[in-house]
Amino acid sequence: MQVQPYLFFYGKCEEAIEFYKEKLGAEVDALMRFKEAPEKAPPGTIAPGWDDKVMHSSFRIGDSAVMASDGMGPEEATFKGIELTLSVESEAEADRLFNALAEGGKVQMPIAKTFFAKRFGVVADRFGVSWMVIAGA
């Protein structure tokens, strides 16, 4: 059994995937657009003009799989009550990833030494996804 996050970016999925490829080294396993579906969605299900949007994607960050989509139409992406965690070996790698995710985002807790880790910080990336970055737990 596995539990995998499925993120909805409501029109910015491809942009988010490219950001994660550049900043986190994500590798795309699958990407399907709405226009590639074998059957058309019932009228009113998908927003008009969304044929080129991402219906489903799967990508890997390190050993972890993440799935993502644009959803069914434009909404504000809200990621509340959940944070993704990046656990890394070195303090330098933690700092690098934290700073990369912070580009255009919002630092929620600056990365620093804590009583439970050599480095720990929380940042919401420019898409609103919150990340905890930890090294040396």
Image: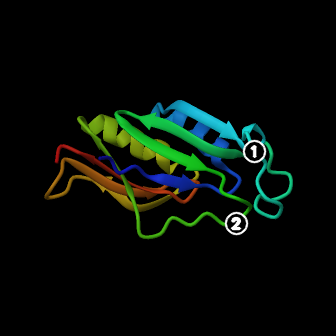
User: Which structural element holds mark 2?
Assistant: loop
Residue 36 quadrant: top right
Location of residue 68 in the rendering, given as x and y in whole percent from the top left corner: 56, 48
Quick check: 107 left or right of 39? left
Q: Is residue 52 above or below residue 72?
A: above
Q: Is residue 26 above or below residue 113?
A: above
Give the label, 1 or 2, closer to the camera.
Answer: 1
Location of residue 3 in the rendering, given as x and y in whole percent from the top left corner: 35, 51
Q: Residue 127, which numbered label? A: none
User: Which structural element holds mark 1?
Assistant: loop
Marks 1 and 2 sit apart, C-alpha to C-alpha, by 24 Å
User: Label 2: which residue?
Assistant: 75
Q: Nearer the viewer, residue 51 or 45?
A: 45
Q: Residue at x 57, y 33 (%)?
A: 30
Q: Nearer the viewer, residue 24 or 104?
A: 24
Location of residue 125 in the rendering, given as x and y in whole percent from the top left corner: 52, 53
Furthest toward the front, the residue is 39
Q: Earlier in the sequence, mark 1 or mark 2?
A: 1
Residue 121 quadrant: bottom left
Q: Is residue 7 visible?
A: yes
Q: Which amino acid lies under the numbered mark 1 shown in the image of this protein? A: Glu
Location of residue 82 in the rendering, given as x and y in whole percent from the top left corner: 41, 64
Other-residue count near label 1 (Cα within 10 Å), few / some / many at <14 / 14–19 / ≥20: few
Q: Residue at x 52, y 39 (%)?
A: 58
Residues under numbered marks 1 and 2 in contact, where contact means CB atoms less than 8 Å apart? no
User: Label 1: which residue?
Assistant: 39
Q: How is the image coloured?
A: rainbow
Residue 47 quadrant: bottom right
Q: Is residue 125 visible?
A: no
Furthest toward the bottom, the residue is 81
Q: Which amino acid lies under the numbered mark 2 shown in the image of this protein? A: Glu
